[in-house]
Amino acid sequence: MVLNGRPLTVLVVVSLWLLLVCGLSYGVQSDIDCLKGIKAELEDPYGYLNTSWNFNNNTEGFICKFTGIECWHPDENKVLNIRLSDMGLNGQFPGAIKNCTSLTGLDLSNNKLFGIIPKNISHIIGYVTSLDLSSNNFSG
Ligand SMILES: *[C@@H]1O[C@H](CO)[C@@H](O)[C@H](O)[C@H]1NC(C)=O
Ligand SMILES: *[C@@H]1O[C@H](CO)[C@@H](O)[C@H](O)[C@H]1NC(C)=O
Ligand SMILES: *[C@@H]1O[C@H](CO)[C@@H](O)[C@H](O)[C@H]1NC(C)=O
Ligand SMILES: *[C@@H]1O[C@H](CO)[C@@H](O)[C@H](O)[C@H]1NC(C)=O
């Protein structure tokens, strides 16, 4: 097989492009799934998430405007921090948080969350350096 310069270059460029596009869209989609999952898992009696967390508008960075969400960049669906304190949220620790793979801070304090804090929480939120679950009804 003979490969002269040009087809090889094209191949390399296309491969890199595919890698980049797949990598990016994967990260982005998992963060959207993360927030969708959290919204589905938590009861929100005062409608804080109900009105703000709207998944119908799929523009780049749309989740960054959600109540309590901070992104790494305002125009990229990649969640840096989740701050949902004092919202009357009810339910168990939302397992969907594991899909926010770039999360560094999580504040769910002052809500009505209950149940056991997962033992493997350090695997679920591996990069979180700031965690506040105080003033809930967690056990264990
Ligand atoms: C959530 O929003 C929908 C439509 O925006 C509304 O019909 C529903 O009553 C709201 N639910 C709560 C609990 O606020
Ligand atoms: C979708 O979100 C973007 C960014 O927040 C906003 O500029 C745009 O107006 C929204 N579009 C609709 C149809 O809501
Ligand atoms: C994470 O997202 C995937 C889809 O991307 C979904 O199938 C899975 O149930 C989610 N995990 C959790 C714990 O919600
Ligand atoms: C954490 O443990 C639960 C069961 O206790 C399991 O379903 C889940 O996959 C585990 N998550 C991780 C990230 O290890």
Image (cartoon, helix red, strand yellow):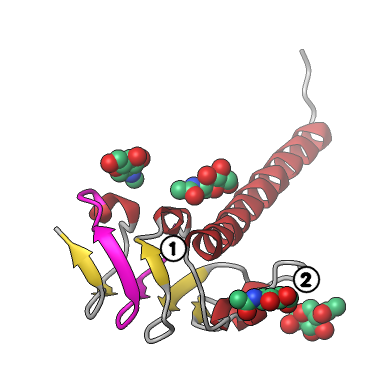
Q: Is mark 1 within 8 Å of ligand 3?
A: no
Mark 1 Cα shell of 10 Å, populated few (<14), some (14-19), many (≥20): some
- In the picture, measured across the screen, residue 108 lies left or right of residue 122, that is right
Q: Is residue 37 left or right of residue 9?
A: left
Quadrant position of residue 2: top right
Q: Amino acid at mark 1?
A: Ser
Residue at far left of view = 140
Look at the picture and state if 27 lies above or below 108.
above
Q: Which mark is residue 57?
A: 2
Q: Residue 25: x, y in percent?
A: 66, 53
Q: Is residue 31 magenta?
A: no
Mark 2 is surrounded, within 10 Å at the Cα level, by few (under 14), some (14 to 19) or many (20 or more) other residues, namely few
For the C terminus, the image quarter is bottom left
Report the front residue among 116 and 57: 116
Residue 135, horizontal then vertical, whole percent? 23, 80
Q: Residue at x 60, y 80 (%)?
A: 66
Q: Main secondary structure of the magenta part?
A: loop
**Image quarter of the N terminus:** top right
Residue under numbered circle 1: 102
Name the side, left or right, on which 104 lies relative to 61.
Answer: left
Confirm whether residue 75 shows in the render.
Answer: no
**Dot 1 and dot 2 residues touching (CB under 8 Å):** no
Q: Amino acid at mark 2?
A: Asn
Looking at the image, which is closer to me, 93 or 8?
93
Asked whether mark 2 lies closer than 8 Å to ligand 2, one says yes
| Ligand 1: quadrant of the figure | bottom right
Magenta range: 101-120
Q: Is residue 77 visible?
A: yes
